Structures are given as C-alpha cells and as structure tokens.
Amino acid sequence: MRSDLPTLGVGLGYRPEYHDAILRHSDHLDFIEVITEHLFAEPGRGSLERFAEVLPTTCHGLQLSLGSAEPLDGGYVDRVCEAIGRFRPPWFSDHLSLTRIDGVDLGHLAPVAFTEEILEAVCDKIATLRKRISTTFLIENIAYYFPIPGSQLTEADFLARVVERTDSGILLDLNNLYANAENMGYDPYGFLDAIPLERVVEIHLAGGALRDGLFVDTHGHPVCEEVWELLEFVCRRASVKGIVLERDQNIPHFEELTAELRRARRILSGGQ
Amino acid sequence: MIHLYTDADAREAFFGGDLSFLAAYDLTAEERAGFVQLRTRGRRGLEFFASLLGKKRMDKVKPLMPISLLVWGEGPWEEVWSSYVLDRRAEPPLRLVLEAYRLSLAILEASTQRFATESLSRELLLYESCKLRVASTEYRMESPGRVSPSSQAGEAMDLVPMILRPYVLQTFSHDLSRVVPRLEATRQIPQALPNPSLLLFYRSWAGGGVGVAKVTRGVARLLENCRGGESQQSIFDRMIQPEHPDSGRARVAFERAMVTLERQGVLVFTKKGVSNDARSDD
C-alpha cells in the first residue's frame, strides 16, 4: 500500500442538492468526494470541475461491478480512465458488489457471494483496472440485508484477501459495517480485527434507521453513536487519510452536517 | 440469485419451499444449504432488498422520462410504474433505456382512459415514447468509407446516403418541435393550438444521441430510400420522373435536403454501398 497518499481530512459526498451550500460553507470542508459517473458527461462534469478548483476531490464509482461473472465493461472503464486522468484524484474507489448481470444494470449495489471463485474474478478485474489506471484504488464494503448463500469465506476474510492480493486500499464504510453486524448478528469489532486496518485509506460515515427489525443504511439520518465509536476505534489504529460524510435523504440544514464534520475532524486528529 | 431479487413469483415460491429453480445451477451441497438457510433466516432482508432494488430502478428510469412525469404527475406516474413492474415481474430486468421504452408504452396504454387521442398531453407522451424507441436500440456507429459530400465535389451524386435504423416518423396534431422546447424550459405544459407536424426521431451520426427533426412528406419518402445500398443519383432517378415539369426543382430540393440532413447528423455518406446493419436490435 502506498504511504505517500496525502491526508485530506474531512469531507462530504457531493450531491447536487447541496451544491450551493457546499460553495458557501467550503471552509468547513477539507475535500469533497464526487460520484465518478457524474464526471462522464455534462451537465454534471462542468460544475464538478469548478468544485475541483476550490477543493481537493476524490472519485467514488458505483458501477464497476467487481462481483459480476462477466468481464469489466470496457466502455465504462474507458470513461473511468478519462475521468481519473482529467481530475487526477489522489485515489478513487468503488464497491465490493455487483451492479450488472448480463449487461443489465440492476440499479443498486447487490452483494457478492464470498467464494474462492468470486474472489478470483474480483482480483482479476482489479488487476485489469490497475493496468489502465495507476492511481490508488480503494474497495468499499457494502450493506446487505440477508446471508449470502454459498459463501465459503467471511466478508472480512474475503475483503482482506482481495486488498492484499491486488495491493488495493480499503474504503471502510462504518455504517455499512454496523448495519451488517446488526442484521447478521456479528461483532463489528471482530470484523475490524480481521481486516488489514493499515490499508484503510478512507472512511464513509452515514446514518441509518431501524425498519421492521432491520437496520437500514438510509443515508438519511444522523450518524449513530455506535458508528462514532467504531470511527474512534479505527482512527486510533489506522492512518486514515480522509473521512467522508454521506447524506442523500432528509437533507438537513448545513449546520447539522457541519456539526458532524467537526466531530469527525476531532476524532481524526486524535481527540474524542 | 438475480431471480430472487427481481422475480416476485420466484421469491414467493422459494419462501414457500420450492427450490426447483436451483436445479438449473450446478450447486454444491454447501451452496444449496446456503439457500435453505436464506429461506429460513433471510426472508425479511431479501424482501427488503428486492423492494429497495425496485425503488432504485424506478429512480433510475425517471430521469429518462421527464415528459411523462410532467404530464402524469409524480404520484400517478409511480402508480403506473408499480403496475408495469407487477405485469412483467417474472421477466428478467432490461437495460434501463429499454425499460423506459417499455414503460412508455404502458403509460400510453394507461393514458387512453385519461386523455383524448389527439390531445396535447397524449401527443407529448407519444413523443417521449418515439424518442425512447430510437434510444433503446443499441448501435454500432462505424460507417466504413464515410466521406463528406463537400470534399467529394463532382462525385457527390455517386455517394451513398445512409440513415441509422430504426428511425421513427410520426405525425402529430400539434407542432411538438415547438411545444417540447417550451415545456422543457418552463416545466409546464404550454398552451398550443393544433398545428399538424411530421417529426423524425433518429439516431444522430454526430455523437450518437437521439435527435428530433421536423420534416416534410417528401423528405420522409427520401429517407425511406437511404438504406446505405444505393447512390444519391440512383435514388433521385428513381424518385423523380424526368418528364415531370417540376423535376428540375425537385432534384434541387432533394439535393438541398440531403445536405441539411447530413449536417444534422441524420445521414452519413459513404463512397460505396454498405449494408445498413449498423445496429443490433434487442
């Protein structure tokens, strides 16, 4: 894992809904994270290019579909290459998930079975990607809501082996981890003990809520206390380079977000 | 797994104890046991995920259908979506734009109860459906031997014009080439008096997007002949009767139309005939 990555600090996942607010409150942000697919074409690209002039920017993709049985979508990878070449983020990321089956976009991140076969396929795809893009690549853990049939490995072992074999970093989504631990009934700290924390480059924070007995990753609520505790645990043990707060629904006044950003910054810098 | 995500019938059967769909896969005993465990432990989570997938998919289709969302209103539009999803719940998911096209047909069907056939609202829905019809076809944009007629002065009539298929020619009672830009600018359905128009929905050679152009009946007939297998000269000779007193003017008009269509990206010219197979239908 490269040690020369810059420490960006605390940022926000860019959403068009708070475009103006971000510009007004950019002094509260150390960087922003943009959805890679929004850089592919106008109208999104132009305004994001202007943001990138104001704040450091990282790129976070949704549609690489590392867990698909089929090869990487060449056209999609071309566009990712173009976007990364243009924006030159310090790192870029996507999910340990599948979003495409037989060329059809599912519209959401679906979980992969944690098997040896899928592990090979995921590693091959990342290797192919790395041949095209030398920028550090991070893999994010997703939230899933049921045990994945046929899994031979735990999610933590699967993730650890993928990042070690492909020399990738981890984008650790703590709300996803907390949701999975709650819904599947495992210890989130056991998960953290089982992954190479030295590879955690970035952390995602978000809120969730209980619905019909499931803890759902809503991106529409404040970050819960248990997730803050997980953040403290990780920041004490890993050299985290950036923390991104994600909020997609029930978007509050920006002041509420800045309070969460301040708390994250305190934890990142060693305070509680 | 994808069947369990997207097919409510398969999911229901699975939770009812039917594991027959697994027979199509070469599962190990361990993998099979995983599915049995999913049936007993994961029902609520799987059902939640399936509904999440459906909602996300709807959210992805919406931006492809801004006109029908405006005409129907968001709530009723979502009701049509739900009923559409229910109707085809046993089918595999489609590419988003193809899904949008199929939904546009369902919306047109549902709109017969709500709008008169020639009402502006109904015609706007038809307009969106025509655009999606063209957009939903996958194309290969290569055109071997593509040339610009202006660079081939003296040989221009030997060049072969080609339009990508399928394209759609649709008659409307209103001039939607004027109405739609106003609707897009104001996000409101404008007042418009009937004013018949013939619109061409085409895949542009310049960039691959879907274009819309108002055309005359003569141009529509001309386009029918631009299949990529016949030179301009030959097409004109076939379409224009030399003994007709207006044949000279007709030829000039056709030549001008060809130039305009090429500039708009409707046509491309090649030096020799190539088959018009630059597409692959679903």
Image (tube, coloured by chain):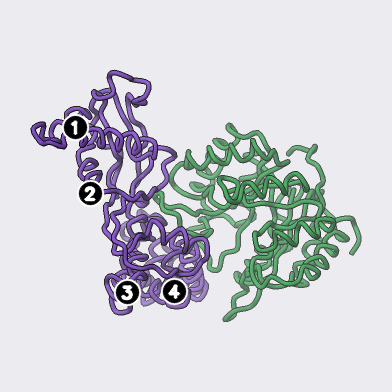
Chain colours: A green, B purple
Question: The C terminus of chain A is located in which quarter?
Answer: bottom right
Q: Label 3, label 1: how many angstroms apart (C-alpha)?
A: 47 Å
The disc label shown at residue B217, or none: 2
Q: Is residue A119 visible?
A: yes
Nearest the camera: B29 or A119? A119
Q: Chain of mark 2?
A: B
Q: Chain of mark 4?
A: B
Identity of the residue furthest to the top in this view: B154
Q: Chain of mark 3?
A: B
> Mark 2 vs mark 4: which is more N-terminal?
4
Q: Label 2, label 1: how many angstroms apart (C-alpha)?
A: 18 Å
Q: Position of residue A268 (x, y in %)?
A: 85, 56
The disc label shown at residue B40, or none: none
Q: Position of residue A171 (x, y in %)?
A: 69, 52
Q: Chain of mark 1?
A: B
User: Which amino acid does the dot numbered 1 rest on?
Assistant: Gly
Badge 2 crowding class, 10 Å Cα cut-off, few under 14, some 14 to 19, many 20 or more, is few
Q: Is residue B20 visible?
A: no
What residue sits 30% from the left and 35% below the top? B258
Same chain? Circles 2 and 1 = yes
> Which residue does the numbered mark 3 point to in the structure image?
B111
> Mark 2 vs mark 3: which is more N-terminal?
3
> Mark 3 vs mark 4: which is more N-terminal?
4
User: Which amino acid does the dot numbered 4 rest on?
Assistant: Glu
Between disc 1 and disc 4, the foreground one is 1
Identity of the residue furthest to the left in this view: B243
Give the image quarter of residue A186.
Answer: bottom right
> Is disc 1 placed on a helix, strand or loop?
helix
Same chain? Circles 1 and 4 = yes
Q: Label 3, label 4: how many angstroms apart (C-alpha)?
A: 14 Å
> Mark 3 vs mark 1: which is more N-terminal?
3
Same chain? Circles 2 and 3 = yes
